[in-house]
Amino acid sequence: MALEKLKIAIEENYPSFGRPMDVLFNPQQIQLSRAGGSILEGQLVGGDKPATLTIELFFDTTLSKFGSEDVQKYTKPIYNLTRKKGKLDRPPLCRLNWGKGYAWFLQGYLKQVTKTLTQFLEDGTPVRAKLNCTFEEWIPLEYQKKNQNPIDDPIRVVKRGETLSSIAAQEYNDPSLWRLIAEVNKIDNPRAIVPGQVLTVPPLRVNSTF
């Protein structure tokens, strides 16, 4: 069985993302953190803050298959994710995934990156490096609105592990009504929804049959 690589998909024009790229070597660990709210005069304030993901990526081109290339050829695509991209006029969003399927465990942007070159050839060509990356979760405005007004807002952002049936169970108290959501969003394959996808959840019509 082939080794699954950590993948990073880069936004082209939200919600469209390019083909995910593999990192050169899988990280040894991934650190996720989230700050909670504060108690002020007995009330919880400042909750729902974005999560932060910290990861160290390793790069080494001294192996024969790389031919001791300049390692920055491989670090550059990630290092430049902090820069504005084309028509976006801002750094692109990223989706990180490790494993089969489309279970993105974070959607956000590269907030900070530190590149360290650790080995060089005699001519000064860098062949080994590491990137210390900090990604910050990006929460779509539609999702924020849904949290503020979960009953009246027809917008729903798919979370990891959710299905159309589970969404219908929460929205309509009846998982069998998933076809109503699929029909409005023109979804042919109910298994094809992915985390971060924005769905319209229509109000339940009286005497609807699906």
Image (cartoon, helix red, strand yellow):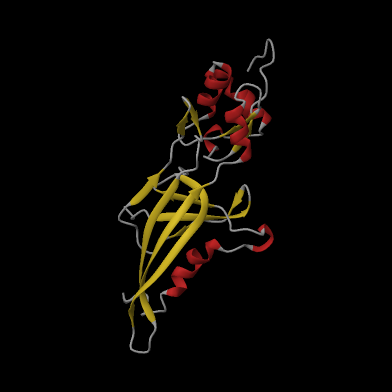
Q: Residue at x 66, y 28 (%)?
A: 183
133, above or below 178, in the image? below
Q: Is residue 188 visible?
A: no
Rendered position, 24 above or below 69: above
Instruction: Answer above or below: position of 44 versus 60.
Output: above
Q: Nearer the viewer, residue 207 or 96?
A: 96
Residue 160 visible to the viewer: yes
x and y percent of residue 18 in the render? 57, 56
Residue 190 in picture, x, y percent from top left: 55, 32
Q: What residue appears at the point 62 percent right and 62 percent down from the top-left corner?
A: 85
Residue 160 x %, y %: 47, 37
In which quarter of the view is residue 199 placed?
top right
Question: Could you say which is closer to the camera, residue 94 or residue 49?
Answer: 49
Looking at the figure, which quarter contains the C terminus?
top right
Residue for point 67% across, 24% down = 202
Q: Residue sitting at 66 percent across and 33 percent down?
A: 185
The answer to which of 96 and 130 lies nearer the viewer is 130
User: In the figure, is residue 92 to the left or right of 130?
Assistant: right
> Where is residue 201 drawn, in percent x and y?
64, 27
Question: Which residue is the extreme one toward the bottom?
Answer: 123
State how many labels appear: 0
Q: Residue furthest top?
A: 207
